[in-house]
Image (spheres, grey):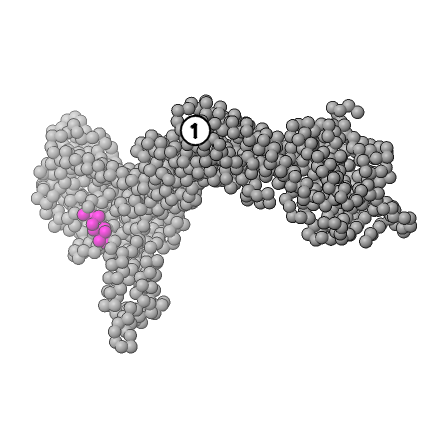
Amino acid sequence: MAESDASASKYVTLASCDGFEFVVLREAVLVSSAIKGMLDPKSQFTEARTGRCYFEEINGIVLEKIVEYCQYWYKYKESVNVPDMDVPVELCLELLQAADFLGLDRKASPSTQTHHYYLFSKTPEEGFIALTYNDVGPT
Amino acid sequence: MITGRGGPSGRGRIRPPRRQLATQPGSAKNDFEQYWAKLREALHDIHTHNAGNLSFEQLYRFAYKIVLMKSGALLYDRVTDFEGKWFAEQVMPPMSALITKNLVSITLDGAPGISVVERRALGEKFLRFVRTSWENHNMAMNMNADILMYLDRGYGEDNRRPPIYATTIGLFRDNILRKNLGATGSNYDVFDILNATIIDQINMEREGDVIDKALLRSCVSMLEGLFETDAEVELERLYLTTFEPFFIRTSHDFYRIECERLLREADARSWLRQTQRRLAEEAARCQTTISPLSEQKIASVVDEELIMKHLDEFLQLEGSGIRAMIDNDRLEDLKILFSLVSRVDDKVASLRNALSLRVMELGNEIEQNLNNTDFSIAQDVGSEETPGDGEKAKPKTLNATAQLTAAAIKWVDDVLQLKDKFDQLWVACFDRKAVIETALTRSFSAFINRFDRASEYVSLFIDDNLKRGLRGKTEAEVDIILDKAITLLKHLNEKDKFESYYQKHLARRLLHGKSESEEIEQEMISRMKRELGNNFTQKFEGMFRDMSTSRETTEQYRNHVRGLGEAEDSRVDLNISVLAGNNWPKEIMGRSTGLSDETKTKATYPPEIQSLQKSFFEFYTKNRNGRVLTWVGSAGSADVKCIFPKVPGKATGPLSKDRRYEINVSTYGMIVLMLFNTTKDDEWLSFEDIQATTNIPQPDLINVLTSLSVIKQFRILVKESQTKSAAKPGDRFMFNSEFVSKAIKIKIPSVSAANRVENDEERKKTDEKNLETRKHVADSVIVRIMKQRKELTHTQLVNEVIQVLSSRFKPDMSLIKGQIESLIFREYLERDELPDGTTADKYKYVA
């Protein structure tokens, strides 16, 4: 893909650490604030110039689900009463981590030390995976 | 706790995420330094526009990991430090270089001596640098914020630190704008210079120079994007807190000076236009150069400095102020003026007062002109009386009274013109604003009513139009004239006075058949009725009623006489007007019935007429028992067929034949002429003889004899002494057997029959009568009120009386008080007494 029209193309490529590549609608992946930042044509980072985002710490299985969500979001973003997306239980934790990294979450209660992450949300109140954890660990 | 929505097949092992982060104690510190080193390099590259080879994902991941390592605070501070240093090392030095002593002194200290071009160049260079460094910084900070996104999410928000973007963008404010310029030997910071430079550029534009608007706009939008603190409170934009007050303050200065200059130039026209242009300019400037946020504020600066402060002085300017605008119909000026004044004062008080004042002045001018005209007429009268001044006699034989009438009509015309003019201004320039209309109406009323002949003149104006003015006019034109009359009438305070004049004038029109069209007369009355109420027109309608009954009565009487079959020759045709005494003005009903205690004189009618009167009286009282008819000789007229026998000794010319004329004279004139039926050819009758025989009141007799003997065309009697002046006691009269006229029918003009302006004496009489009438009216009003209320305090009573009376005239306090006293005296009212015997401030009605 030539550099000059990389930023103009309707599609972008998302690459996983284990070599899978997904060509996705640009508009769909903009749901992620991190990917949006990467592709911002004003900043001219490598990703923006090439139209290819490489994720060093996300594997193909998880990235596929992420891509699926992006498409899902894009398809239904202006509808109501949308069907649920299927999230395999065994992928939950990894997906949570990736969604957090990519900024696919909505934080429900920023004022408390308890975090409610509703990831892959249809609305801020409703998520496909919801996780509540207490902020523990070294401070 | 994990809530999965994986469906019913919730089996399968949940795989824990791979933790690549080695979290052995001690290594965290190293990892951080390692990541930070990468990030710092990236920040540097971003500033130097070398971001092309950086991987966003990588940098983002570094920041992400630092945050996960709970080292967000450290990263936050490091970034802030880095940017601060960047400013100090990379941005400030060139900036300081641009802020030369010159720039400081011209922008802030107002030092003269540098040409505009140079000043502009210096300023623009500085502003350009500010803009460039701001744009660079802003761009870089946006990119920073993007890669440090996770820092905000994972650290900043939880620890209530402002977003990293806000903090780093704020650094521009702290490190650049607020940087003190101690180094250049002045006590200003960059912000001062920036503001002053922008203002300097704006002032250049105000003076007519061309400046780089886009440059200013971007500097201003920088200030709009920066806040006092990193909390970014909406109202604490630097634009609002620092620039705008400065801008407003300097604008005040600018426009104060401008307004003073305009005032010195003393041309209200250019002031109006300049102000209007300035307002438009400032509005446009807010859109294109600075911020729309200031549009209101700067407009009010212009309003205050250019409009409000010296408004009255501009209005009073000789030659271009409001007076000149009105007099020269400078509609556009007035329009602008109105729009400007409306901006600062919704009630437009200054404009309103100025207009009122001008209306009053112009009103006074009309009166003054009139007085001058009156004066010249008096002169003419004087010259007419000097004999041998024949060539000065005007072709139109306007006598003094007719000229007075002309003056009245001129006055009305002038007033109406003035009113028209202001009405037009009101529509064209003042947006039909109600307060202005009220003010205009009020001042019109004021000057109209200050002129004590107003009521009479208005009535005369109507009279003149109804008599001859309406001939050949279309309905629409007539309508306009009636409208005008009503307009004036509405302005009159003393409606009772108008009523009595109108009554008098109408009576003359009706009795002498002078009215042009009865339809229009009726229309006039019905309009008055609409405007002023039923009461007002009662008498007028009564007069019309009398006239139409009289026509019927005349017809009936004629039929009656025909039935009697009297000899044709001796029949005198009678056309009678039976007038009900109340409806008609007293002077029409005969002078003797006036207020003065003159004995009731009764003219002696010739026997022919007497029998006629008797016959009619019998006929009239047949159906109407107990009525008394009084013959009013002064109000009637008679057609007399006259035969002038041929003059002996004249062979040719008109005198050689018998001449027959039909002469229309007043009733008294007829009586006088009848006397000469019985005289011999050369017999003279003295004034006193005539008076004794006919018993006609002296003033009427003078009128009659004058009209019959003085004017050449109508000289049926010869007067001795033969002067042009009026007949007087001591003169002798003889039948003019040599009378010749081209017309067969001759109408002898009655001296008193024309409606005209009263002379001073007459007016004094009218005023006295009026006062008398007012007393009666006031009496009846007081009694009516007290009858209803039984008890009232003095103030209450007076207030109510004034309220009732004001529709007819402006009551005088002393008049009301006097009438109350008189009513107490006549025992209609009494003063209430307190229990202790002293009188209370209260009246009681005595039943």
Quadrant of the image for the N terminus of chain A?
Answer: top right
Going by the numbered disc 1, the residue's amino acid type is Ile
Q: Is residue B185 visible?
A: yes
Which of B382/A129 is in front?
A129
Q: Quadrant of residue B375?
A: top left
Please determine whether, in this image, residue B815 is positioned above or below residue B607.
below
* Mark 1 surroundings within 10 Å by alpha-carbon count, few (fewer than 14), some (14 through 19), many (20 or more): some
Q: From the viewer's perspective, is A71 left or right of A139?
A: right
Circle 1 residue: B106
Please state the extent of the stretch shown in magenta in the rendering: B761-769
Picture residue at 74% right of the left edge, 44% below the top: B69
Please determine whether, in this image, residue B154 is positioned above or below residue A24.
below
Callout 1: chain = B
Picture residue at 29% right of the left edge, 74% below the top: B834
Q: Is residue B559 visible?
A: no
Q: Is residue A12 magenta?
A: no
Picture residue at 73% right of the left edge, 53% below the top: A114
Numbered disc 1: secondary structure: helix
Which of B486/B1 is in front?
B1
**Location of residue B438 in the rendering, given as x and y in whole percent from the top left corner:** 39, 46
Q: Quadrant of residue B658?
A: top left
Which of B306/B26 is in front?
B26
Dominant secondary structure, magenta? helix
